[in-house]
Amino acid sequence: MNKYILTKRQVVNELSTFYSFLLGFLIALMIGSIILLIQDKNPFDTFSLMFKLSIGSVNSLSSSLNKATPLILAGLGIAIINTVKLWNIGAEGQIFMGAIAVNLIYINFQLTNSTSFIFVLLVSAFIGGAFCILIPAITKVLFGVNEIITTLLTNYIVIGLTIYLVNGPWKDPGSLNFPAAAYVGKEVYLPTIFGKLSYGFLICILFTVFAHYLKNSSVFGYEMRIAGGSEMTAIYAGINAKQKAFFAMLIGGGFAGLAGGVELLSQTHRVSTGISQGFGYTAIIVAAITGMRPIGIFLVGSLFGALSIGGSVIQTIGVSTYIADIIQASTLFGALVIQFFFNYKLKRADDG
Amino acid sequence: MRRSWAVGLIIISILTMACGGAADVDDYKAAFVYLGSANDGGWTQAHDEGRQYLVEETGIETAFTEDVPPDATEFRTVAEAYIEQGYNIIFGTTFGYLDIMEEMALEYPDVTFLHCSGYKSNDSNYTNYFGKIYEARYLSGLAAGSLTESNKIGYVAAFPIPEVIRGINAFANGVKEVNPNATVEVVWTNTWFGPEEETQAANALLEAGADVLTQHQDSASTGIAAEAAGAKWIGYHTGYGKEAAPNAFVTAPVWNWGPLYTEMVNAVINDEFTTTPYWTGMSGNVVDLFEVSDDVSSDIKTLIEDRKQEIIDGTFEIFEGSSDGDLLGMSYFVDNVVGTLD
């Protein structure tokens, strides 16, 4: 009888994450094609139209990148927190909190210089996101409470808070009772670089570089990795692991909060329950699929932005939007399974 | 063979040129952006039936997208994809598209934007349309008032916006006319389509003693809850409720968008389109009351028929002395309604 066992490969190709993602994506396209064929649609026509309408013109490309912006920013935040081997499931709530912070500052303070006002609002968004993860961070470092549970639960609290605000104190009298806050003034809209591409995307590029530096090249990043690796090593190296974990969580939460602020100032222009359409959860997928690498998050986040736009436009030619969802989900699944085989190999047990 | 092709082509091009400039349905494509699913048995299905009627009547090419949330970014993505594919009439069938449609109408002056249930318009290519469903709600109130024994009628409602409040008040006026002792109790769900929230609200009303329920919601959940409790139910949107809750179902205020859609699209094609909002009711055949079940006595059925005719003739006012403006901004409850407005 042949028995198989899994053994970890000694040498793992540095590019394995990239290859596994690519293979996963191809598998996902094949699954999508089969479903399209079952529905009597031509997969080639469908995918080429999806391609054309999501990245085929300046207009659609900028829509895709705008869509990618919150995914990338929140994904970077998740990756930073993961440097200390902690999980942030609360990016969705932090996105909402970032938007709430922007509106709070916007309605209470007015700066005449709109550039500095936008800057202040974006900083508020970052602080809002950090504030949102404060309690999970404190309970984690003081009492060791599982951050997966606490960050997840804060999502429900913050979304509940949003519903309260847009139905209560912040409800726009001009909206005839429609549950949304008043629009922010045009003077604080994030300008566009070209076409419809918002400056939010530029912020996104800057923060990708920043996150990459923070994780891989900075002293803090090094200390975070040690702190996340082994408690004993951290103690030996004189690193306060709890302190590193605490600040990593606040910074990561801030990234997601910034995502909410950028989304408000560039896209929705007001607080409502539609600030995020599950960006915080998709960001977990983006971060996980890339092995928490900032540059990877940037690339895959952009692709997911395009897929999301493609998924919305695919319906305009009579294909269900769920096809795009299936492609997204199978990309993740395919990439994770393949990545597993890049890291491990199957061995016959009797080979010794 | 080849020559006959060429001759054919020439004839076709001459014909095309002859028609050039004149109204031609082939120059237009209409896209519908929906909040819900096209077979939801409710609001969106009523619109999609209107779209199918439009296609039959005019032969225009149409397409639709479902599940587009009432927020700016999604609507823009979908609408721009349509515009890029040459669609030049865009229907948006939920209130929340109001501002983004206004914004896009400015950016795309060659595209006509038609918004259902809003109140905004511009002077060239953007207007709103709606049906006076409250007329049918008033008639359904006559049925409900005659059926309640506990004198408590439950109303599961989405959001406290004028459209919904107007419907509640019209319904309550109908109830009052046949049963001055009955009250209409309102529970808000804060969602247009939320089977769970709707069920929860319906059950709360049933527990509070209501024996007749109605709704301003997009699913049949209220009817299913009423069916389970042995109560009566007045549906909304379509007659689909009759299948969902056969014993509870009494009647339903229903939409009939087809004729209005045909009228608006023909106006665009024939270059007669104006941005005066389209707002008609039973007289314009946009709304109606679904066939009333035999739970309702023949006296009341006769009263409903009489009132319906008076509304069509314009001899009966549901809200005496109110202008269209008053109705469109309605933000108070009439005195037999129990509930909060925020």
Image: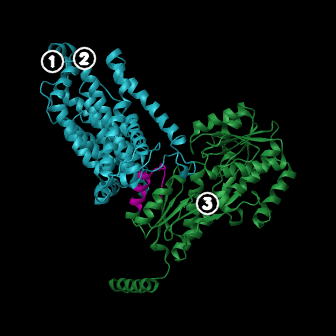
Residue marked by disc 3: B130
Q: What colour scheme does the image use?
A: by chain
Cα gap from disc 2 to disc 3, whole angstroms: 73 Å
Instruction: Identify which amino acid the numbered label 2 is placed on.
Output: Met
Residue marked by disc 1: A351
Please state the extent of the stretch shown in magenta in the rendering: B64-82
Instruction: Identify which amino acid the numbered label 3 is placed on.
Output: Phe
Please state the horizontal and vertical placement of residue A305, each as a whole percent of the image.
Answer: 32, 47
Mark sitting earlier along the chain (1/2): 2
10 Å crowding of disc 3: few (<14), some (14-19), many (20+): many
Q: Is residue B236 above or below residue A281?
A: below
Residue A207 placement: quadrant: top left
Where disc 3 sits, the SS reads strand
Cα gap from disc 1 to disc 3, whole angstroms: 76 Å
Residue marked by disc 2: A1
Instruction: Identify which amino acid the numbered label 1 is placed on.
Output: Asp
> Comparing marks 2 and 3, which lies closer to the viewer?
3
Q: Is residue A198 left or right of residue A221?
A: right
Chain B, which colour?
Answer: green
Residue B295 can be seen, yes or no: no
- The cyan chain is A
> Comparing marks 1 and 3, which lies closer to the viewer?
3
Cβ–Cβ under 8 Å for marks 1 and 3: no
Q: Residue at x 50, y 46 (%)?
A: A180
Chain on which label 1 sits: A
Cβ–Cβ under 8 Å for marks 2 and 3: no
Which residue occupies the foreground of this view, A266 or B148? A266
10 Å crowding of disc 2: few (<14), some (14-19), many (20+): few
Q: Is residue B237 left or right of residue A188?
A: right
Please state the horizontal and vertical placement of residue B260, each as a whole percent of the image.
Answer: 61, 66
